[in-house]
């Protein structure tokens, strides 16, 4: 048996569960023991009955022992301990909203608690909060001011203070709060957690004490974006018992590696090189090379241990953009030669039709490359390997694939394409290296959003999960 992780996470428990190295019962015992031994009293208002939680954990362990893969597939949060803010109903436990005089014991659990327990999660307890959600500080409660997990001299943020602190201390793998005007996002920021405030209506609020029904959201606290999104995927869905619930399409988490800095640096490199060489094609090659180098640098840094991908992405975005504007000063006024275009509207006497059908060669190449990559990633061996490495690096390593070199190469190629995208901006539309570049970036951003929605729709149609998965999730 493996040791209980110091910080509980969804993925950190799922893997040892699947490997048979850990049991849900062991995790529940460890969670309650840690709370008794280490937890500041003000975090909790009501703890769940440990014997009931143990009985549930043992039943889940039996399911896991029979067929681990099938059990985890059927119960995506099997054996994962969680906590809820004490304005969310749990059958048999009092709901106080941090006001003892208001306390009442509901006969039925809130919709979110019901969904989590159906998915195999195990409730540990209900947490403290600013009374009736009237605060963003976590100190306005007769059960005590919830102190910051990292420095008790500071506040935890509120109003979902106890839920954030419980997750940050590692007593549970994730927790639920509520957010009407910051009550989930503020404590997440103060407690070094990922906090998700979903679009109103995406998660049912039935069974949660309302603050403003049209704005209320059940929020999620977790240690990683992947964990938070996994919980969101379990909770999302229409609840006909909630009048504000609605079906909402989701694109999924943002890519972990951004290309904005590479795009701008590619635009500058192409324009400057085209001006100095007199050839837009040499400028295009320079943009591709610049993007390749920045992408490779990005991939290499992100492959190092204890490196945050998003922080590196933002740093390189600022680096690429700053370098572009610094080195691009001499090329603001000069005019560089532009990339050629295909005049497909010569058959028309209407000048507007002619302009509309004048298409840059890079646009045509991009359309062809889009369909080629779509086919390759879905239908070829290397495409499937790339997807495997992106979805589950551990599985890829177990199969003997060199994850780090392939990821660096893939990031470098992404940088190359972003550099070419920058060349399109400066050498065709808007065709300058100055403030007008932003109009082209805006158009490209709109195109990328449309493309992302199209790809996700295509993936849903092509995926066998599309017939069984009713909630938004990165894999479907």
Image (cartoon, rainbow, N blue to C red):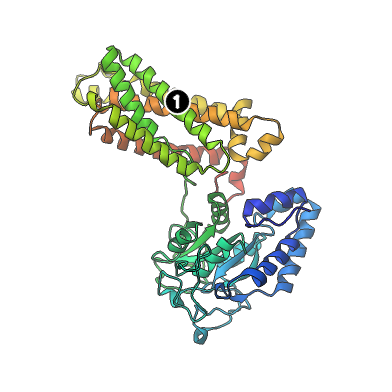
Q: Is residue 316 left or right of residue 49?
A: left
Name the residue: 59% across, 67% down: 83
Determine crowd level at label 1: few under 14, some 14-19, many 20+ residues with C-alpha closer than 10 A. Answer: some
Res 53 seen here: yes
Pinpoint residue 213: horizontal percent, then vertical percent: 41, 70
- In this rendering, is residue 221 above or below 291? below
Nearer to us in this view, 209 or 10: 10
The residue lying at 57 percent from left, 66 percent from top is 166
Expressed as whole percent of the image width and height from the top left, the position of residue 88 reads: 53, 72
Q: From where the camera sits, is residue 358 visible?
A: no
- SS at mark 1? helix
Residue 122, picture quadrant: bottom right
Image position of 375 (left or right of 133): right
In the picture of the structure, the residue carrying the numbered disc 1 is 293
Image coordinates for residue 25, horizontal then vertical, percent: 75, 63
Q: Quadrant of residue 124?
A: bottom right
Q: Is residue 392 left or right of residue 330?
A: right
- Residue 127 position within the rendered picture, expressed as x and y whole percent measured from the top left: 55, 72
Name above or below for residue 196 compared with residue 29: above
Which quadrant holds residue 368?
A: top left
User: 176 or 109: which is nearer to us?
Assistant: 176
């Amino acid at each position: 048996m493996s040791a209980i992780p110091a910080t509980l996470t969804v993925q950190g428990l799922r893997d040892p569960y699947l490997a048979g190295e850990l049991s849900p019962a062991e995790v529940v015992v460890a969670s309650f023991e840690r709370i008794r031994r280490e937890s500041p009293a003000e975090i909790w208002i009501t703890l769940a009955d440990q014997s009931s939680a143990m009985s549930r954990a043992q039943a889940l362990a039996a399911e896991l022992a029979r067929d681990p893969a099938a059990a985890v597939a059927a119960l995506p949060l099997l054996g994962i301990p969680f906590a809820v803010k004490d304005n969310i109903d749990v059958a048999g436990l009092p709901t106080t909203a941090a006001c003892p005089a208001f306390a009442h014991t509901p006969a039925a659990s809130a919709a979110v608690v019901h969904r989590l327990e159906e998915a195999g999660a195990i409730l540990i307890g209900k947490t403290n909060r600013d009374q009736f959600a009237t605060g963003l500080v976590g100190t306005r409660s007769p059960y005590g001011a919830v102190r910051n997990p990292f420095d008790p001299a500071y506040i935890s943020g509120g109003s979902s203070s106890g839920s954030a602190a419980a997750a940050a201390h590692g007593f549970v793998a994730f927790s639920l709060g509520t957010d009407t005007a910051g009550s989930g996002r503020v404590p997440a920021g103060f407690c070094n957690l990922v906090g998700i405030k979903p679009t109103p209506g995406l998660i049912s609020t039935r069974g949660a004490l309302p603050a403003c029904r049209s704005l209320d959201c059940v929020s999620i606290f977790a240690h990683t974006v992947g964990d938070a999104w996994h919980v969101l995927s379990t909770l999302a869905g229409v609840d006909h018992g909630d009048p504000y619930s609605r079906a909402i399409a989701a694109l999924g988490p943002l890519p972990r590696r951004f290309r904005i800095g590479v795009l701008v640096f590619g635009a500058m490199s192409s324009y400057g090189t085209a001006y100095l060489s007199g050839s837009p094609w040499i400028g295009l090659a320079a943009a591709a090379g610049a993007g390749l180098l920045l992408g490779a640098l990005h991939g290499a840094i992100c492959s190092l241990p204890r490196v945050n991908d998003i922080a590196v992405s933002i740093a390189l975005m600022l680096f690429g953009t700053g370098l572009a504007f610094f080195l691009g000063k001499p090329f603001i006024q000069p005019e560089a030669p532009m990339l050629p275009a295909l005049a497909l509207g010569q058959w028309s006497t209407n000048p507007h039709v002619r302009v509309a059908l004048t298409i840059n060669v890079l646009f045509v190449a991009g359309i062809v490359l889009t369909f080629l990559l779509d086919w390759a990633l879905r239908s070829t061996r290397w495409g499937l390997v790339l997807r495997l490495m992106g979805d589950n690096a551990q599985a890829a390593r177990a199969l003997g694939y060199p994850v780090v070199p392939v990821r660096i190469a893939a990031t470098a190629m992404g940088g190359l394409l972003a550099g070419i995208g920058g060349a399109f901006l400066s050498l065709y539309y808007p065709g300058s290296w100055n403030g007008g570049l932003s109009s082209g970036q805006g158009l490209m951003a709109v195109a990328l959003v449309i493309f992302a929605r199209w790809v996700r729709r295509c993936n849903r149609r092509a995926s066998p999960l599309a017939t069984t998965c009713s909630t938004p999730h990165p894999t479907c």
